[in-house]
Structure formats: structure tokens, C-alpha cells
Amino acid sequence: MEKLTVFVVEDEAPARERLLAFIDAHPALKLVGWCDSGEQALAQIPATRPDLIFLDIHLGDISGLDVLKMLNEKPQVIFSTAYDRYAIQAFELSAVDYLLKPYTFDRFQQAVAKAIQYRRPATRRKHPLSATESVRMHQPLRRIPARVGERIYLLPVESIVYFSSEDKVVFAHLTDKSYIVNYTLEELEHRLDGEQFFRIHRSTIVNLNFVQSIEPYLGGSYIMEVKDRKRSQLHISRNAARRLREKLGW
């Protein structure tokens, strides 16, 4: 298998040397460069065009989060930091993983394994991706970050029964709990696996694996019962019902 080319952005020398040693010890990785500031990263990453970057969040000039936002063509990224409070922002930027310092070689290997699994096609583009192309290039979301107080939970998408929006706040509903998430339904509709999740209403996206039953309602709409603890009943709009019938063949 062709090696993943890697670039490192880390301003703490001990952490950088440790990470470089980890990369050197990993048979699937090839280091193409490193730097210790955001400004250097913005200049060198487009020039080296790595498959993957290890990006520290706390840099001396520009934060790693802002560095990634300013890159036109974005490689896969694994963030590293001593603080967990940036995890939601990191995953919103489609980070492959989020390493909390100090991390072990085993934890490093887990993050690299995800990057290899989600690897994009090796073909290089001459022009930056448009926003729409960039969304399409991303792998479907595998987990959804949600904050409760100071604690961050990573919710596996397969455990989420449905998403709903109320007064511009989006909730992820599991079988017995609900969490506020920092995505819009439009973002989720584009980022979730379309074979598993379906938007049944302007305010609802449902995990089809949790559908219990579908019954006719008023004016060509339907009611869907899902397999959560409350046996919630969700409204399917008329247009969504038509598309769902075509999708499921009922």
C-alpha cells in the first residue's frame, strides 16, 4: 500500500520530537515536512501537499483550527492539544481524530488507522475544491460530538434514533437520552450516510434502522413510530413521504 504523506505542525519541541519518532516508527507513514507556526503551515502545506497533517491547536501565532479553515485544499487532519474543550470545533472541521497530550503510541496508531480507513483517492487536483465538492469528498460522519456542561460526548451515529430541530437548536435523540449538537439539519443531511438517515420533515432526520412502523395521516402525509423508549411518533411531510416510498419501495 502506498504510504500516507504526513506534515506536522507543532510548536512544542518535546511534543514534536515525540510525534516525529512515532511517525518514523509507523510503516504506513512518510514524513514530508514539519513547522512550528501557523504562518509557516499556511505556506508549506500547500507546497508539500500531504495526505495527512498532525496539527497542534495552540500555536504561537494562529490557532490550528484557523490554519485548517484558511487552507483552500484541506488534507485529512488529526488535531493534538492538551485541552479537550476544542473537540467539537475540531470534529466540525471534519477532523479524523483528536489526540489529547500526552498520548501513547497505541493511541497514535488508532488515529492513523482511521486516517488510512477514510483515505481519499490519491488523485491530486490542480484547483481547490469548491465548498460543495469538499462536502462530497468527506466520508459520512461516524460520530457526533455533543457537550453536556464541560464534558464532551462522542455519539456513534448508529446509536442515534433521530435528529430534530426546535427553535434553531438541534437535538440528537438516542433511545433514552437527548443531546444538543452543534450542527444544522442541512449539514447533517449532507454529512450523514444517506442509506441510513433520511430527512422526513424540515425539522427531522431519522435513522431508518430504528423505524417501527409508518401509518397514513392527513393530506398525504404519514406518521412514523420509532424504536426509542417513548415510541416517539414523527411526522413525515407529503413530499418526504413520496421520496421515502421511492427509496424503500413500499
Image (cartoon, rainbow, N blue to C red):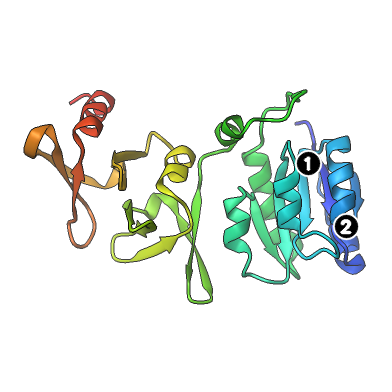
Q: Nearer the viewer, residue 196 or 47?
A: 47
Q: Is residue 206 left or right of residue 223?
A: right
Look at the picture and state if 99 lies above or below 158. below
Count residues near mark 1 (Cα–Cα under 10 Å), then give few for <14, some for 14-19, many for 20+.
some
* Residue 25 in view of the camera: no
Instruction: Name which quarter of the figure residue 20 lies in.
Output: bottom right
Q: Residue furthest bottom?
A: 149
Q: Nearer the viewer, residue 219 or 174?
A: 219
Which is more N-terminal, label 2 or label 1? 1
Q: Using the numbered discs, state the Cα–Cα distance from disc 1 to disc 2 in whole angstroms.
A: 26 Å
Look at the picture and state if 81 lies above or below 213. below
* Residue 158 in view of the camera: yes
Which SS class for mark 2?
A: loop
Q: Is residue 182 left or right of residue 220?
A: right
Which residue sits at x=43%, y=42%?
Answer: 186
Count residues near mark 2 (Cα–Cα under 10 Å), then give few for <14, some for 14-19, many for 20+.
many
What residue does disc 1 label?
Answer: 28
Which residue sits at x=56%, y=31%?
Answer: 132
Instruction: Name which quarter of the figure residue 50 lies in.
Output: top right
Q: Is residue 24 left or right of residue 116?
A: right
What residue does disc 2 label?
Answer: 37
Instruction: Name which quarter of the figure residue 82 lies in.
Output: bottom right
